[in-house]
Amino acid sequence: MASSNGGHEAETDGVDLGERKERVLHTRVPDSLDRHIKRRARSLGMSVSTVVRNVLLTTFGLVEDIVNDSTDIALAVTGQEAGPRRDRLRGRAATAGSSAEVLAWQEAVLNVNAVCDQCNAILQKGSRAGIGVREQAGPRPIICPACLAAIARPAAPKARR
């Protein structure tokens, strides 16, 4: 079967989140799902396209996590050791690259609604969030205050003179 990317097979190891979004995906959905997606996008202050893209990316990662966890459970029940697990790209919506690519986190007040890349918490416009500072070009991950606090180390006490 010919693929739509110039005859080359699609990469199956993950999604390059920094890749330019050049492809348009058309699909037929029931009217009720269309209304639901549009309502959700409006309530999040996002475009329908962004919501659908985030849902698709998150769903693939979620299914992969379920399969990996199920495999680990099956191996543990049979007394076998689980092998090393391949890390998947999370991000906006996961998903945004791995946290290893983030040099630092900057706390900011959001000017748009967003979703936490780590726990999927809904972040409303005007709320505080952590914005990932990256060395490479690409989307910046956004995390909620709770996930930011989990990453941050407590400041070392200052020496008294």
Image (tube, rainbow, N blue to C red):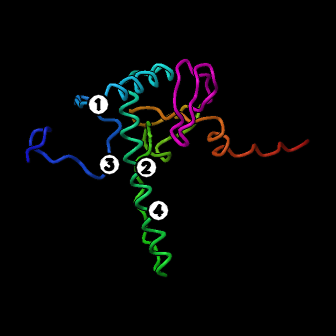
- Dot 4 falls on a residue whose secondary structure is helix
- Dot 3 falls on a residue whose secondary structure is loop
Badge 3 amino acid: Gly
Q: Which residue corresponds to the image point at 39% horizontal and 23% vertical from the top-left?
A: 35
For residue 102: magenta? no
Characterize the local packing of mark 2: few (<14), some (14-19) or many (20 or more) Cα atoms within 10 angstroms: few
> Which residue in the structure is indicated by mark 1?
29
Up the image or down, 41 lies above or below 14; here it is above
Left or right position of 113 against 37: right
Give the mark nearer the N terminus: 2 vs 4: 2
> Which residue in the structure is indicated by mark 2?
62
* Cβ atoms at labels 3 and 1 below 8 Å apart: no
Give the mark nearer the N terminus: 4 vs 3: 3
> Which residue in the structure is indicated by mark 4?
69
* Cβ atoms at labels 2 and 4 below 8 Å apart: no
- The image position of residue 80, as x and y in percent, is 46, 80
Observer-nearest of 78 and 12: 78
> Which residue in the structure is indicated by mark 3?
14
Left or right position of 148 against 94: right
> Quadrant of the rendered structure where residue 20 is?
top left
Characterize the local packing of mark 3: few (<14), some (14-19) or many (20 or more) Cα atoms within 10 angstroms: some
Give the mark nearer the N terminus: 2 vs 3: 3
Task: Specify the segment rendered in magenta.
Answer: 107-130
Instruction: Measure the C-alpha gap from mark 2 to mark 3.
Output: 13 Å
Badge 2 amino acid: Leu
For residue 120: magenta? yes
Q: Which residue corresponds to the image point at 46% horizontal and 25% vertical from the top-left?
A: 40
- The image position of residue 143, as x and y in percent, is 56, 36
